[in-house]
Amino acid sequence: MPVKNRFAELHAEITEWRRDIHAHPEVLYDTHRTAALVAEKLRAFGCDEVVAGIGRTGVVGIIKGKSNASGKVIGLRADMDALPMQEQTGLDYASENDGAMHACGHDGHTAMLLGAAKYLSETRNFDGAVALIFQPAEEGGNGALAMVEDGMMERWNIQEVYGMHNQPGMPVGEFAIRKGPMLAAVDFFTIHIEGRGGHAAHPDQTVDPTLIGTQIHAALQSIVSRNVDPVERAVVSVTSFQTGSDVYNVIPHTATLKGTVRTFAPDTQDMVQARIEEIVAGVAASFGGTARLDYQRITPATINGEDQAAFAEEVATAISGGCNEAAISMGGEDFSYMLQARPGAFIMVGNGDSAALHHPEYNFDDDAIPYGSSFLSEVIERRMPAA
C-alpha cells in the first residue's frame, strides 16, 4: 500500500497548518496558541472527545471506530513545542516570535497527526478507539511525563502508543526503526567548585578553582574509557566551563562546569553517576578546594517494544516499500516516558537534505507529510482492523 490518496488531496491544507504553526512557535509548556489550534481542529473534524490541559497544556482527542468489539485503544503522539533560539531561514513563514523557532520539526509532527486525525474521523475504518496525543515541552521539559502523571493512559485506557520524529539526511518517503534501545537516557550535571581567590601574582596564597576544574574535566574523560564496559555505550561531555571574570590579575574564587551523560543500561547510568561524584569530590580535595555536584536524570532511554517495532516496520514497509534499521543514537527523547507506561514504538521519517535538527536554518520538509500521516493512520487501521 503506497501513501493514502486522501493525503495527496489534503497535502496543501495540512502544509498550510504546518506553516502557520511554524510561524508561531511556542516553547516548553507555553504552547497555548498551538494547543488551542489543535483542539479547535479536532472538534471541527468531529472527534468524539477533545480534552485540553492534560499535562498542563497537552491535548488529547478521541476518535471511535465503526465498532468497538476489540475494546482496544491505541495512542498516537506528536510533540508541539519549539526551541528557544533565533530562526535564520528567511522563509516567508519564518517565526514571528523573537527567540523561538521550530528547529526540530515539531510543527511537522503536529501537522501530520492532525492530518491523520482528519482522515480517521472521516473514515473510522477500525475496531476500537484512537487517542490523539498532542504533547508540550518535549525539549527539556518532560511534557510526556507530565501527561502520563496526569493519568492520561488510565483515563482513556490506552494500551499501546506510537510516536514519530523526522530525520534530516534520510530521503523523504523513507522510514527507519529498530527493536529495543533506540535513543539514550539523558542526564545533566552541574559541578560547583569553590577554591580561594586572590592576586594572580601570588598563586601560592590561593586555591585555584580553574586548575581544579581542568583536572576534573580531564578525569571525567576516563570514565567511558576505563570504567564503562567496552560493549556498552556511554557519553560524558562537559559543555560549559565558567570561571572568573575578564580580569588579568585575579585568580577567581569559584568555577562552574556543566555537562551531560548519555547511557542505555541502568547499571551503566548508576556507575557513571557514582564515578562523577567520586572524581568531583576527590580531585577538589586533592587541590585543597571543595566541589558540589548537582546531578539530574532528565529522560530514560527510549526502548521500543519488540512486537510493536516489528509491526511499525511492517506498516512503514507497506507505505514506502521498505524500512531501514535505525542507528542507535545518543540523543534523547521524552517519549521514553510513554513507552515506560505502555508498550509501543518510536519511528523516524525522512526529512531529506535539510539542515540538522536544532540548527537555525532547519526547516521541516512538507513533502514528508503524506508519508507521516499515512503511517499514523495505517497503524490504527492495521492494528485494529474493522470487524
Image (cartoon, rainbow, N blue to C red):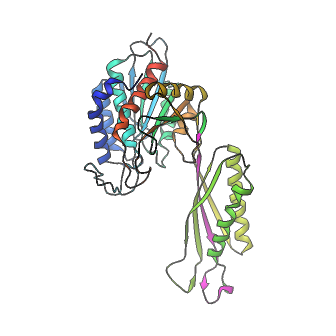
| Residue at image coords 29%, 48% | 23
Residue 308 left/right relative to 87:
right
Residue 47 can be seen in this image: no
| Residue at image coords 74%, 54% | 227
Which image quarter holds the C terminus? top left
The residue closer to the viewer here, 36 or 238, is 238
| Residue at image coords 46%, 41% | 170
Which image quarter holds the N terminus? top left
Task: Answer whether residue 210 is magenta in the image.
Answer: no
The residue closer to the viewer here, 325 or 341, is 325
Residue 240 left/right relative to 10:
right
Q: Measuring from the top left, give residue 113's x and y in whole percent.
A: 38, 32
| Residue at image coords 36%, 35% | 369
Is 111 placed above or below 215 here?
Answer: above
Q: Main secondary structure of the magenta part?
A: strand
Q: Measuring from the top left, give residue 56's x and y in whole percent.
A: 42, 41
Q: Measuring from the top left, give residue 182's x and y in whole percent.
A: 58, 39
Residue 143 left/right relative to 277:
left
Span highlighted in magenta in the image:
182-204
Task: Answer whether residue 190 is magenta in the image.
Answer: yes
Q: How many marks?
A: 0
